[in-house]
Image: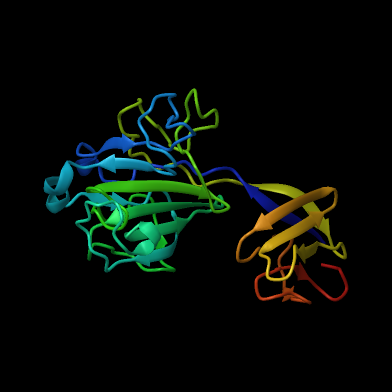
């Protein structure tokens, strides 16, 4: 039996994270800083060290009117934090690791999105929930390290923040389905789910080998055939899809608590 080793998924594109009715109230106030207070368009609509994209809603008047924050794509909620003061103006209010009230979501392509500075009592989801693109998560507020009501939208890859906008000073593909024009907001169009790319086949009896990078490390050096890669995170899972149906045995051998390996096989390597 040959098994398909699926390791790669093409990126998931995002919809602007609000409703069609409320999009008109959002406008960018600070983009991701690429160094020297330079945004994706080589302008200076940012501030030093900013690692997200901020969108205002018309101050506290807009906040009090209730401006919806919605999921930019399908995914699973990692964190849903509420209960923090939401009328911060100092830029240094406590709670949520700086995000105040916030939600983070893992997506099928391995990226994670953050929705920060939400209104107190507005968070509608819980950790572990499966959400769909356009599902309401909460409302815009001014909690955490905020100087006024706005949505902080952040995209991370392997816990490193990246800019979702493509431009002259960020020559990577846009993470939006349609990012729109500079100074505006992206379109509210949900992208199709990412397509998993089968990177190789695994014949019965072949070995997948992994090793932690050191004591207490979450880095995993993985190898299969001629491909070697490093994974950083709480766990790693290989999905092996059989070419035929039948009973499956899952063997977990010599693995630590932060490494999960799922392998499909049988005792005879047949089937």
Query: Which corner quadrant of the image does residue 211 belong to?
Result: bottom right
- The residue sitting at 27% across, 56% down in the picture is 118
Give how far across and how far down residue 251 sits, in percent: 76, 76
Q: Is residue 91 above or below residue 172?
A: below
In the displayed structure, does residue 9 sit left or right of residue 26? right
Would you say residue 38 is visible in this rendering?
A: yes
- The residue sitting at 76% across, 57% down in the picture is 222
Compare residues 154 and 216 and report the one nearer the observer.
216
In the displayed structure, does residue 138 sit left or right of residue 60? right
The chosen color scheme is rainbow
Q: What is the quadrant of the C terminus in the image? A: bottom right
Query: Which corner quadrant of the image does residue 56 belong to?
Result: top left
Query: Which corner quadrant of the image does residue 43 belong to?
Result: top left
Would you say residue 242 is visible in this rendering?
A: no
- The residue sitting at 36% across, 68% down in the picture is 126
Q: Is residue 47 above or below residue 236?
A: above
In the displayed structure, does residue 246 sit left or right of residue 34? right
Give how far across and how far down residue 39 sits, in percent: 42, 30
Compare residues 136 and 87 and report the one nearer the observer.
87
- The residue sitting at 35% across, 66% down in the picture is 81
Give how far across and how far down residue 131 sits, in percent: 39, 59
Q: Is residue 219 above or below residue 173?
A: below
């Amino acid at each position: 039996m040959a098994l398909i080793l699926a390791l790669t998924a093409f990126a998931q594109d995002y919809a602007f994270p609000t409703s069609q009715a409320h999009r008109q109230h959002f406008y960018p106030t600070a983009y991701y800083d690429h160094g020297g207070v330079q945004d994706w368009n080589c302008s200076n609509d940012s501030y030093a060290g900013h690692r997200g994209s901020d969108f205002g809603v018309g101050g506290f008047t807009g906040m009090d009117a209730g401006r919806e924050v919605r999921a930019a794509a399908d995914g699973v909620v990692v964190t849903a934090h509420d209960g923090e003061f939401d009328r911060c103006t100092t830029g240094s209010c406590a709670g949520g690791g700086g995000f105040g009230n916030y939600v983070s979501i893992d997506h099928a392509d391995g990226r994670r999105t953050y929705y920060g500075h939400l209104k107190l009592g507005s968070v509608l989801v819980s950790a572990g929930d499966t959400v769909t693109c356009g599902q309401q998560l909460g409302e815009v507020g001014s909690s955490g390290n905020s100087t006024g009501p706005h949505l902080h939208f952040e995209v991370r890859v392997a816990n490193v923040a990246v800019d979702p906008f493509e431009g002259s000073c960020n020559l990577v593909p846009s993470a939006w389905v349609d990012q729109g024009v500079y100074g505006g907001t992206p379109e509210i169009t949900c992208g199709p789910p990412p397509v998993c790319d089968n990177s190789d086949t695994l014949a019965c009896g072949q070995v997948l080998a992994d090793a932690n990078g050191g004591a207490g490390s979450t880095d995993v050096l993985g190898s299969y055939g001629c491909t070697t890669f490093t994974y950083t995170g709480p766990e790693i899972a290989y999905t092996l899809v059989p070419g035929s149906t039948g009973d499956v045995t899952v063997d977990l051998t010599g693995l630590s608590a932060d490494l999960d390996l799922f392998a499909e096989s049988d005792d005879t390597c047949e089937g």
